[in-house]
Amino acid sequence: MPKLKTKSGVKKRFKITANGHVKHGVAGKRHRLISHNAKYIRQNRGTSVLAEADTGRVKLWAPYGLN
């Protein structure tokens, strides 16, 4: 059985925590921020945990985990 490859985009965009959750950067913070209010920018700072429904799909794309 050949080795499975990890999707290149997943390596760059996600991290798996010790508990098995998936962390990701929050969308909507790159450009056109003048149209967003301060509360939106402040609440989307940093990273957040991916929803459980999407976690399984991301883990399929990274068959051996992410380091």
Image: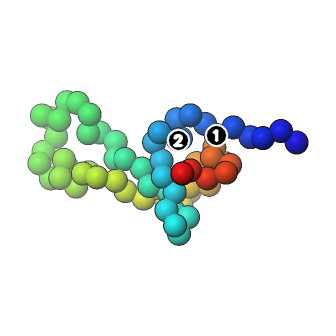
Query: What is the tally of numbered marks visible in this picture?
Result: 2
Report the disc number at residue 47: none
Residue 54: in sight, yes or no? no
**Mark 2, secondary structure of its residue:** helix
Depth check, front residue: 54 or 64: 64
Relative horizontal placement of residue 19, taking residue 27 as reference (left or right): right
Residue where numbered disc 1 is placed = 6
Q: Is residue 2 above or below residue 32?
A: below
SS at badge 1: loop
Q: Give the residue displayed 17% in from the left and 35% down from the top.
A: 33
Q: Amino acid at mark 1?
A: Thr
Which residue has dot 2 on it?
Answer: 11
Q: Residue at x 52, y 41 (%)?
A: 11
Q: Nearer the viewer, residue 36 or 67?
A: 67
Image check: 49 left or right of 29? right
Question: Does residue 10 show up?
Answer: yes
* Residue 37 percent coordinates (x, y): 12, 45
Along the viewing direction, whichever of 51 and 49 lies nearer the viewer = 49
